Image (cartoon, rainbow, N blue to C red):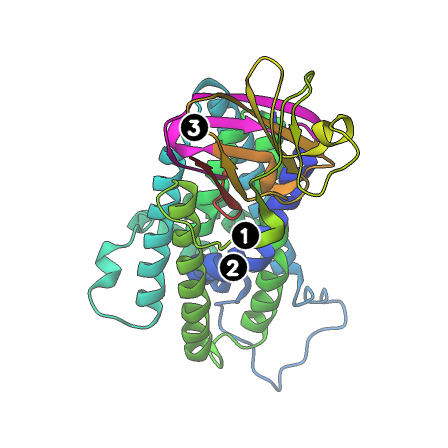
Amino acid sequence: MPSSIALLITGASTGLLAGGASCAAVQGGLLAGAVTRRGTPAPASAKKPASAPQAATPLAPVVAFLAGKLLSHTLLGALLGIFGDALQPSPRTQAVLLLAAGVLMVLFALDLFGVKGVGRLLPRPPASFGRLMRRSARTDSVATPALIGFATVLVPCGVTLSMELLAITSGSAVAGAAVMAGFVIGTAPLFAVLGYVFRRSSQALSGRLAALTGVVVLAVAVWTMGSALQAGGWVSFNTPDKQAAASAPFIVEGGDQSRAAGDSGGSETAAADVPVRIDASGKQILTLTVTDFYETTQFSAKAGVPTTLVLRGKDSGGCARAFTIPELGVQEIVKRNGDTKVDLGTRKPGSLPFSCAMGMQTGTIDFK
């Protein structure tokens, strides 16, 4: 199972870098309604009696909104983790869902730009839900924004869908809750700023904010769809450099033959470290070192030879731990420190792409 701490960090970083703008585009209206008082303001000249309670600080409704959102999304993550424990989607199914999320974000961005007709294509909460939220927003109770924040789980944004997918693939209630909680925490800074702005002046920046958010959401959509295409193994946008390529040496362990580029000290030390080798039984061993990244992204290997891929975790973390080979349907959670073996069988000549589950890190094994 994936590390809950690693998934918490993954969710938080995704929320901070991409999710905030995407979710603000979808849930900004609910946020504005939750933190903006809709009642008729008292005349400026009216004086409050000395015994009247002080008004809540401008950030109090924002904090309540975010607390409700955190609670509902954490519970959802736990349920998705339990569901994923029973049913794990294949890497390419995950990629298709990510691609759909990216397309959905494009539609949201176009809607923010005011493109006519796009709004009819977007998922909307039921009209009764919208009316309920608008009526609730008219009250001054701090419980109201908390309830509206809790209800945002019914109005997911594009990036949220990818986090929900990651919660499913975690296969654990704790890990699923961690990734969704981390995501909400990551989006909190932007939501706090927007909530404060809405609280102070809900109209002054609304037009510019929509356009700016649309630009950011569109950029995130392009990034999401690119990641989805890589996660499915259909394309690769990465150009490996020489340091990330491994085509030699090939070493026969336990025998007299060895071939190592620039190695004059024998094969014992080399055999333990080289990314491509052949053992005494004739099996080909490919070793991919996994930290927070894949340190070898381009392998050249022999076709027609039984091959095992060793995923060597060295304080591994983040998305890199969720290793996939889409063509073979392989999904492995790399050990934080230790080896995870994947049997690739006897491959014919051709390329075999691999990536992390989110398609953010990729590589290729070229069998020749």
Q: How busy is the neighbourhood of tag 1: few (under 14 within 10 Å), some, or many (20 plus)?
A: many
Between 307 and 234, the residue placed more toward the observer is 307
Question: As shown in the figure, which amino acid type bears the numbered disc 1?
Answer: Thr
Q: Which mark is residue 34?
A: 2
Closer to the chain start, of discs 3 and 1, is 1
**Looking at the picture, how far across and down is residue 127, in whole percent?**
29, 51
Between 247 and 49, the residue placed more toward the observer is 247
Closer to the chain start, of discs 3 and 2, is 2
Question: Mark 1 sits on what residue?
Answer: 144
Question: As shown in the figure, which amino acid type bears the numbered disc 3?
Answer: Ala
Quarter of the figure with the N terminus: top right
Q: Are marks 2 and 1 in contact (CB under 8 Å)?
A: yes
Q: CA distance from mark 3 to mark 1?
A: 64 Å
Q: For this view, does 225 lie left or right of residue 311?
A: left
Q: Where does the magenta region start and end? A: 325-354
Q: Which mark is residue 303?
A: 3
Q: Is residue 50 visible?
A: yes
Question: As shown in the figure, which amino acid type bears the numbered disc 2?
Answer: Ala
Q: For this view, does 7 lie left or right of residue 117?
A: right
Closer to the chain start, of discs 2 and 1, is 2
Q: Secondary structure at mark 1?
A: helix
As displayed, is residue 58 above or below residue 282?
below
Q: Is residue 337 visible?
A: no
Measuring 59% from the left and 21% from the top, which residue is drawn there? 341
Measuring 79% from the left and 34% from the top, which residue is drawn there? 265
Q: Does 311 lie within the magenta span?
A: no
Q: Does 338 lie within the magenta span?
A: yes
**Looking at the picture, how far across and down is residue 184, in whole percent?**
58, 49
Measuring 67% from the left and 34% from the top, which residue is drawn there? 274
